[in-house]
Amino acid sequence: MAAAAATHYCHYIITTVSLPQFRSDRKHLGLCRQFNGCKWSSDVSAVTGLTSRRRGVRRTSYVTCFASNNSAPSSEISSTAKIRSEVLSPFRSVRMFFYLAFIASGSLGGFIATSQLIGALANSSRAAQVPEIAQGLAIDIGAVSIFAFLYYRENRAKNAQIAKLSREENLSNLKLRVDEKRILPVSDFRGIARLVILAGPSSFISECFKLSEPFTDALVERGVLVVPFATDGNSPSFEFEENEEMREKNARRKRLWQLSPVYVTDWIKWIDEQKNMANVSPESPVYLSLRLDGRVRGSGVGYPPWNAFVVQLPPVKGLWSGLLDGMDGRVL
């Protein structure tokens, strides 16, 4: 029965009781990887809620883990990617058709010129026609070569664009946890948020969290949401100071870092494919930023340039929101 089910859910309730002599001014938000009593398959994701410990305060945190046998996103070219490619380059098919027509015409002309050249060379009385026939044959061969090169370049650009759009479609199908009750695909954030995906060891994620602190307000105003993905299996620790002065800022930081990946193997497969295509070492920490329309606007190895995001991205609310919605930068 367990093997036939698509998704299995198990719920844990963790109760933390603070002892009178214990006091902590910080709380941690992290991802859990393993629980006792939960049987894990090869594709397991777990997400915990906020845990807070204070003097004399009892907090209950809910932990939800689930195992999925959903298959990873297919690397095959989807029909949606082909349709989007046609929309983005509507005249490419027309150009390729004419290139093929010119290649066929030049090939036919070259065949005829070749037969005439053979006949002229075999007949001494037509020797005067040889230079003219050879010139026509050279023109036909040159035309076929030029249009064959143009067709090859156009077809190569088409295949590269379709492959990139297919990878973006696979990314849009990956799942993110928003809170304890909501799991949404990346595609649902189109037009709402600019996602910044971080993939690396937990120490890299924690350092990115610290570096983003001075830019929290500006990033939230620009609709940025961070998707941290720890590739070493450890849980990154996000620390928030617990006091009245930092309450509002902590709320914005938690909103900025509220997302977490689910179906881990799907994310691992997609990220490994991107690193392989970019000739990046599998161990290298990387970041990838998306536009509001869900397309990739930037990526790189190492820490994300939070200050550059603030400078380059317009706010998603206010006077300039409608005018600058599409100005997220060029698509990579």
Image (tube, grey):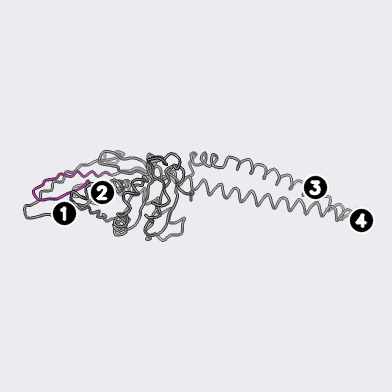
Which numbered disc flags the more N-terminal residue, 3 or 2?
A: 3
Residue 112 badge: 3
**Type of amino acid at the residue the image marks with label 2:** Lys
Q: Please, which residue is most extreme toward the left here?
A: 20
Which residue is found at the position 20% from the left and 50% from the top? 245
Q: Secondary structure at mark 4?
A: helix
x and y, in percent, of residue 105 in the image = 74, 44
Determine the residue positioned at 84% across, 52% down: 133
In the current view of this chain or complex, which residue is farthest to the front?
Answer: 319
Residue found at the very far right of the displayed protein: 125
State the CA–CA distance, disc 1 to disc 3. 89 Å
Callout 4–callout 1 Cβ contact below 8 Å: no
Which residue does the numbered mark 2 point to in the structure image?
249
| CB-based contact (under 8 Å), mark 1 and mark 3 | no
Q: For the residues carrying marks 1 and 2, which lies nearer the camera in this image?
A: 2
Pair 4/1: label in front: 1
